[in-house]
Each structure stands twice: as structure tokens, then as C-alpha cells.
């Protein structure tokens, strides 16, 4: 018997394992890996995948975005694989049921004060093992400052990419090609 080798050598497929040393997160990964394997629910597969993601891919979700996305979804549980943060710009917090990896103290107190509930993923697994009656939400992954610099090179026509500049001022990358008044605007 030979080994079935595809172009590029032997294929090794390795699923991403969580690198965190947090025992709570590791146990959650185990739990949802089991649920994903033993149930036909796509919800559990998605949660399992997101729990194994890096911190960068588990961005926090603000209370305002949470409220906006949960409008007209009474009785449903919002599920965020990440942290829920407070937003001072919101004055009235409606009654929400939220399951997340973590909450800031103020966000938790405001949700509970409004008559809502803050759940953990293990309690969600008991309450809704197949993800029925839940709304899966995500924080803004591309909101990092570094993302502004990715894409087509700055200066190329139709590029909206920000250049790496040591200062932001009139003298720094604001001359030809940047303004109509200085020759041309690319």
C-alpha cells in the first residue's frame, strides 16, 4: 500500500486549538467540541470554532450595538463569543438576555438593573443545547487601527488605504497627489 500524496506533499490538516491558558475557556472549548460532534446543530459548530479563535478575532461588542441588533427579538438570547462592554451614550437599556465570555462591571450592572440576565456559555449549553431561541452576534473584527493600513498601496488611484506617517499634519503626505490644490489628486 502506498500513501496518497497530493501535489505539495502529505496533507496535514490541523484544526486551530485555543492557545489560551485560561482553564474556563479550555473547558468551554471541550464542551462545545463535544456538542458540535454529537448534535446536528450548526450553532454549536460555530460557537466551537469561535471559542478557539485568537483574541484578535474575538473583539468586544458594545452595549449600544447589542441593543440595536436585539430590537424586535423579544425572548431571544443574544450570544457573543467575546466581551460585552458598556456604552455611556446609551441612556435606556431594555431587558436583555445576554450570553458572553465576559462583561465589564458597568455593562453587567446595567443589564441586570434593567431586569435582564447575564449568562455564561455553560449555562447556555444547559438551557439551549442546540442554540434554539438565540441570536449569534459578533464584535467588529475590522475596527482595529491597523486594518486602516491594509489594502491597495496608499497613493495608488482609488486607494483608501492610510499610509504609515509619523505625524498627522500639513507637511506629512499632504502634498502632490493628495490635494487638488497641490498639482493633482490621485
Image (cartoon, grey):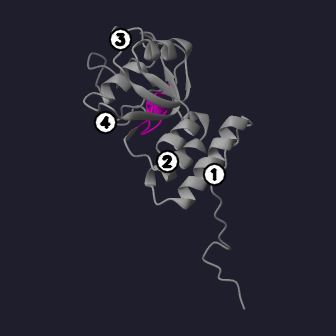
Residues at marks 2 and 1, CA–CA distance in whole angstroms = 23 Å
Residues at marks 2 and 3, CA–CA distance in whole angstroms = 32 Å
In the rendered structure, the answer to whether residue 9 lies left or right of residue 147 reads right
Measured from the top left, where is residue 10 in percent x and y?
68, 73
Check the image and name the residue furthest to the front: 127
Secondary structure of the residue carrying tag 3 is loop
Residues at marks 3 and 4, CA–CA distance in whole angstroms = 36 Å
* Residue 183 seen by the camera: yes
**Of the residues under marks 2 and 1, which one precedes in the sequence?**
1
Q: Which residues are magenta?
A: 136-153
Say few, some or many: other residues with alpha carbon within 10 Å of mark 1 (under 14 / 14 to 19 / 20 or more).
Answer: few
Q: Are marks 2 and 3 in contact (CB under 8 Å)?
A: no
Q: Which residue is mark 2?
A: 129
Please tell me in which quadrant of the rendered image residue 155 appears: top left
Q: Which residue is mark 1?
A: 16
Q: Nearer the viewer, mark 4 or mark 2?
A: 2
Q: Which residue is mark 4?
A: 158
Q: Nearer the viewer, mark 1 or mark 4?
A: 1
Q: Nearer the viewer, mark 2 or mark 3?
A: 2
Quadrant placement of the C terminus:
top left
Q: Are marks 3 and 1 in contact (CB under 8 Å)?
A: no
Residues at marks 1 and 4, CA–CA distance in whole angstroms = 36 Å
Say few, some or many: other residues with alpha carbon within 10 Å of mark 4 (under 14 / 14 to 19 / 20 or more).
Answer: few
**Of the residues under marks 4 and 2, which one precedes in the sequence?**
2
**Of the residues under marks 1 and 4, which one precedes in the sequence?**
1
Measured from the top left, where is residue 139 in percent x and y?
45, 31
Quadrant placement of the N terminus:
bottom right
Secondary structure of the residue carrying tag 4 is loop
* Residue 176 seen by the camera: no
Give the residue drawn at x 38%, y 26%.
66
Amino acid at each position: 500500500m502506498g500513501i496518497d500524496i497530493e501535489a505539495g506533499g502529505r496533507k496535514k490538516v490541523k484544526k486551530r486549538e485555543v492557545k489560551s491558558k485560561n482553564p474556563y475557556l479550555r473547558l468551554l472549548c471541550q464542551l462545545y467540541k463535544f456538542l458540535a460532534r454529537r448534535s446536528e446543530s450548526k450553532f454549536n459548530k460555530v460557537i466551537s470554532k469561535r471559542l478557539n479563535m485568537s483574541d484578535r478575532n474575538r473583539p468586544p461588542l458594545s452595549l449600544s450595538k447589542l441593543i440595536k441588533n436585539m430590537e424586535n427579538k423579544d425572548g431571544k438570547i443574544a450570544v457573543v463569543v467575546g466581551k460585552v462592554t458598556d456604552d455611556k451614550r446609551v441612556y435606556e437599556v431594555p431587558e436583555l438576555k445576554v450570553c458572553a465570555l465576559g462583561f465589564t462591571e458597568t455593562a453587567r450592572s446595567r443589564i441586570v438593573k434593567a431586569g435582564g440576565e447575564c449568562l455564561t456559555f455553560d449555562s447556555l449549553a444547559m438551557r439551549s443545547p442546540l442554540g434554539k431561541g438565540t441570536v449569534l452576534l459578533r464584535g467588529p473584527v475590522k475596527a482595529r487601527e491597523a486594518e486602516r493600513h491594509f489594502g491597495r498601496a496608499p497613493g495608488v488611484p482609488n486607494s483608501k488605504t492610510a499610509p504609515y506617517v509619523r505625524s498627522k499634519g500639513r507637511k506629512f503626505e499632504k502634498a502632490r497627489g493628495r490635494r487638488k490644490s497641490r498639482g493633482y489628486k490621485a
